[in-house]
Image (cartoon, grey):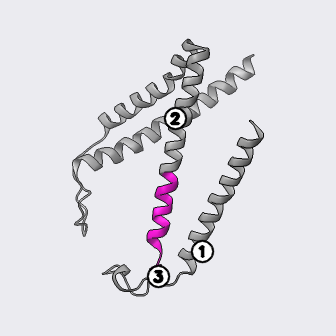
Amino acid sequence: MSKLTYKVSYYVLYAIFAVILVVLGVFYLGGDAQGAEVIAGVDPEMWQPAHTDTLIYLMYGLFYLAVALTVIAALYQFGAALKDNPGGAIRSLLGLVLLVVVMLIAWAVGDGTPMNIPGYDGTDNVYFWLKVTDMFLYAIYILLCVTILAMLFSAIKKRLS
């Protein structure tokens, strides 16, 4: 890694840390919500921070930034590998293809039957969101099992060789 790239990533990391610390400080020390920010129906004894939205938007921003940079870096790495070793670059897509297959299997296994939740009148108890939730849960279970099996087989292979 070049010295310039290291310095830029170093300063960006600490700038992000500073923004996170400022937002956390505002969230915890910014006082109670007032006026329209107060959530109706919540016990008045419960603390409702004034800057909850700021913290949530920061988390959304960091999540989208991480996803975007991951995709850009993967595309850049794939492009560089495609130029040097086309066969290896195509093989590197195998992980992505397997992830899509796992997600499709998890979607198929998921249940979209609306649940009977006493006291809940929200709009998220619908077929699509229930399938998405099940898809992510089953995908996590599948990937966790694959990870554990890979660790076991790797240890066994290391012992045998």
Q: Amino acid at mark 3?
A: Trp
| Distance of label 3 from label 1 (alpha carbons) | 16 Å
Percent position of residue 96, x then y: 47, 28
The reply to whether residue 144 is visible in this rendering is no
The tag on residue 160 is none
Please identify, in this view, whether the residue under mark 3 or under mark 1 is nearer the observer.
Answer: 1
Residue with the mark numbered 1: 25
Q: Residue at x 37, y 84 (%)?
A: 43
In front of the other: 47 or 52? 52
Q: Is residue 43 visible?
A: yes
Tell me, yes or no, whether the highlighted magenta stretch contains residue 59: yes
Q: Decide: marks 3, 1 in contact (CB < 8 A)? A: no
- In the picture, the quarter occupied by the C terminus is top right
| Marker count (numbered) | 3
77 versus 18 height, above or below: above
116 lies above or below 25:
above
- Kindly check if marks 2 and 1 are in contact, taking CB atoms under 8 A apart as contact: no
* Residue range highlighted in magenta: 47-63
Give the SS element for disc 3.
loop
What number is the disc on residue 47?
Answer: 3
Q: Tag 1 or tag 2, which sits nearer the N-term?
A: 1
* Vertical position of residue 16 compared to residue 44: above or below: above
Q: Nearer the viewer, mark 2 or mark 1?
A: 1
- SS assignment at label 2: helix
Residue 86, x across and y down, in percent:
55, 13
| Amino acid type at mark 2 | Cys
Q: Which residue is mark 2?
A: 145
Counting from the top left corner in percent of width and height, residue 142 is at 46, 35
